[in-house]
C-alpha cells in the first residue's frame, strides 16, 4: 500500500507511471475509492511540466484524464524536440511524407 501512496512519475515514462498506478491499485482496495480521489492521485504525482499543463482542465473520470495527460505529453514532447532542433540549428519545419 505504501508503494501506491508514494508512486510518482519521476524518472519513468507516462505509460510506465499509468501501468504501475493500475498495478498497485489492485492491492490497495481501500485507497482512493472515488473517481475524484483517483484523478487527484494521477495529477498530483505527474512530473511538474505535465501537472502544470493539466491545471484548469475539467476531467470527469480516470480514463478521460489518462487520454488528456497522454495528449499533453505528446504536445510537450513535440515542443521539446522543436526547441532542441532550434538550439542545435536544425530546421524546425516538419518533413513531408
Image: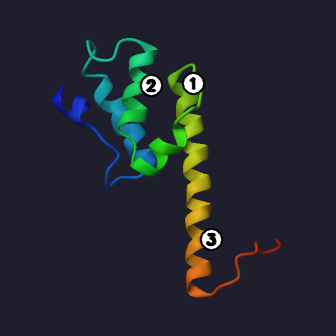
Nearer to us in this view, 63 or 47: 47
Labels 3 and 2: the sequence-earlier one: 2
The alpha-carbon separation of the residues under discs 3 and 2 comes to: 30 Å
x then y, percent, for residue 49: 46, 51
Marks 1 and 2, how far apart in space? Answer: 8 Å
Quadrant location of the C terminus in the rendered image: bottom right
**Nearer-the-camera pick, 33 or 46:** 46
> Pointers 1 and 2 in contact (CB under 8 A)?
yes
Splitting the image into 4 quarters, where does residue 51 fall? top left
Instruction: Of the two numbered discs 1 and 2 on the same chain, state the one appearing first in sequence.
Output: 2
Contact (Cβ within 8 Å) of mark 3 with mark 1: no
Q: Which residue is mark 2?
A: 39
Q: What is the secondary structure assignment of the residue under circle 2?
A: helix
Q: Residues within 10 Å of mark 2 (few under 14, many from 20)?
A: some
In what quadrant of the picture does the N terminus appear? Answer: top left
Answer with the quarter of the image where residue 44 lies: top left
Q: State the residue position of label 3.
A: 82
The first of marks 3 and 1 along the sequence is 1
Q: Which residue is mark 1?
A: 59
As measured in the structure, the alpha-carbon distance from the residue carrying label 3 to the one carrying label 1 is: 29 Å
Residue 84 in the image: above or below residue 33: below
Up-down: is 37 above or below 65?
above
Which residue occupies 59% across, 37% down? 68
Mark 1 Cα-neighbour bin, 10 Å: few <14, some 14–19, many ≥20: some
Q: State the SS at label 1.
A: loop
Between 71 and 27, the residue placed more toward the observer is: 71
- Across and down, in percent, residue 45 comes to 35, 38
Label 3: state its secondary structure.
helix
* x 41%, y 52%: residue: 13
How dense is the environment of label 3, judged by Cα within 10 Å: few (below 14), some, or many (20 and up)? Answer: some
- Residue 16, position in %: x, y? 39, 46
Amino acid at each position: 500500500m505504501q508503494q501506491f501512496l508514494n508512486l510518482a512519475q519521476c524518472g519513468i515514462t507516462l505509460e510506465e507511471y499509468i501501468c504501475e498506478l493500475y498495478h498497485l491499485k489492485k492491492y490497495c482496495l481501500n485507497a482512493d475509492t472515488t473517481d475524484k480521489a483517483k484523478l487527484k492521485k494521477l495529477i498530483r504525482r505527474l512530473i511538474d511540466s505535465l501537472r502544470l499543463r493539466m491545471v484548469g482542465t475539467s476531467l470527469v473520470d480516470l480514463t478521460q484524464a489518462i487520454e488528456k495527460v497522454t495528449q499533453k505529453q505528446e504536445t510537450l514532447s513535440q515542443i521539446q524536440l522543436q526547441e532542441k532542433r532550434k538550439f542545435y540549428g536544425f530546421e524546425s519545419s516538419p518533413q513531408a511524407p
